[in-house]
Image: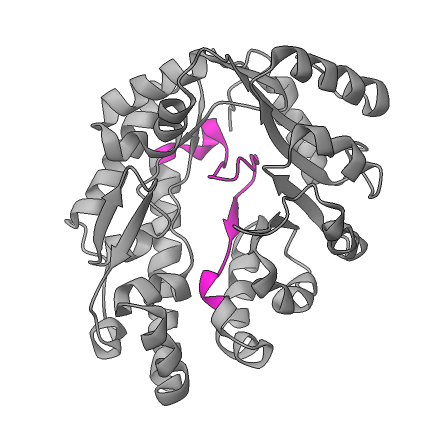
Amino acid sequence: MVFLKTLLYKEDWERVSETYEAWWEGELPRPIIFLTHVSPNVDVIDYSLTLSWAFMRFHPEKALEALFECFSKTVFMCEAYPNVFVNIGPGALSAFLGADIDFNLKAGTSWFKGSFSLDDLLSVELNPENKWWRYVIECTRKASAMCKNKAIVAFTDILDVATSLVHLRGGASKLVKDVFLEPIKLKKVLNNLHQIWFYCFEKISEVIDTSIYGFSNWATLWSKRKSFILQCDFSVYLPPRLFDEFILPLVVEECKFFERSFWHLDGPLEIPHLDKLLNISELNGIQWVPGAGNPDPGDSCWIPLYRKIQSAGKLLQLPGIPISKVIPVLNQISPKGVFIQTSTLNLENAEAFCRKMSEKYGVQLK
């Protein structure tokens, strides 16, 4: 493997990539700091929409040019890096298998809608001519060609098979009924979708050329070795007993498939499943996202949760933590194994924060 050593928008990428490797291996005594600064004169709304939805707004080449324009207006500080996320929405797998996509730019999301029966999905296969599969492959191939020595190419969000099945079935209520009325058939469908899920990952990996770019994703968890961020939004509908029966075996298989894996813990309703997740020895870490309407990840109410995750020997990622709350949080937990993702429009605040992190933890400012 010959990984990129420098990037147009992150000149010290070799140092940063080595820092990520040390973090994954538990050899970094300090936190990873993913800090970005955007000039106040930038249209923040358009900037954010482009970063998230370039490939749903423009054809692939124009999307990449728009992303490069965004990167040129961004200061990637500490361990932040330019991440080209080929995004069609949170649930690409269901689109690959025939679900329709309703993209709403104003709402800033895509909805996936299907009307398949369980019987339809028992033997469903990935059609190589599916328009969304072809589009993601086209975007990824173009990104791999255009990003060399500029940015990192990230994986499309193929979500998880259970939540993808929610999309394909036409809603969570239908899948909840399947859990109780068709448990055997449901497990067969989940296993079938799981094999397609693995295939999609492997194929996209080839198109990205991970021997050059490594493995990145929407969560910016870069790794030299095969990795992914796992999740199951549908788990909020399941008590622990049913999670253990239907979802946990899939998660364990995924964690064994990847050399490194992270779990996207999305809000308090998923916390009842945390103990089982922490017991998976192959799972490297937990990303905590409190969810809308809850205190942000910098709130002290989450400190016991962070300590629990760390006491289980797992890495911890905290995206979206306000910059003013980073140091207070780190003062209450072990800074080792933590990944902080934050941003600011104020360059003076960013530089002052970096100086404090350098003095306290030895974080490199560049």
- The answer, for residue 147, to whether it is visible in the render is yes
Q: Does 209 lie within the magenta span?
A: yes
- The answer, for residue 31, to whether it is visible in the render is no
In the figure, residue 255 lies in which quadrant? bottom right
Residue 66 position within the rendered picture, expressed as x and y whole percent measured from the top left: 32, 19
In the figure, residue 296 lies in which quadrant? top right
Residue 122 position within the rendered picture, expressed as x and y whole percent measured from the top left: 26, 75
Q: Please state the extent of the stretch shown in magenta in the rendering.
A: 208-235
Residue at 77% across, 15% down: 355
Image height check: is 188 above or below 301? Answer: below
Outermost bottom residue: 181
- Image quadrant holding the C terminus, namely top right
Depth order, front residue of 106/215: 106
In the figure, residue 140 lies in which quadrant? top left
Q: Does 222 lie within the magenta span?
A: yes
Residue 1 position within the rendered picture, expressed as x and y whole percent measured from the top left: 51, 29
Badge count = 0
Left or right, 361 with respect to 20, comes to: right
Residue at 52% across, 43% down: 226
Residue at 20% across, 42% down: 134
Residue 309 position within the rendered picture, expressed as x and y whole percent measured from the top left: 74, 54
Residue at 45% across, 12% down: 73
Left or right, 25 with respect to 132, comes to: right
Image height check: is 149 above or below 234? Answer: above
Colour scheme employed for the rendering of this structure: one colour
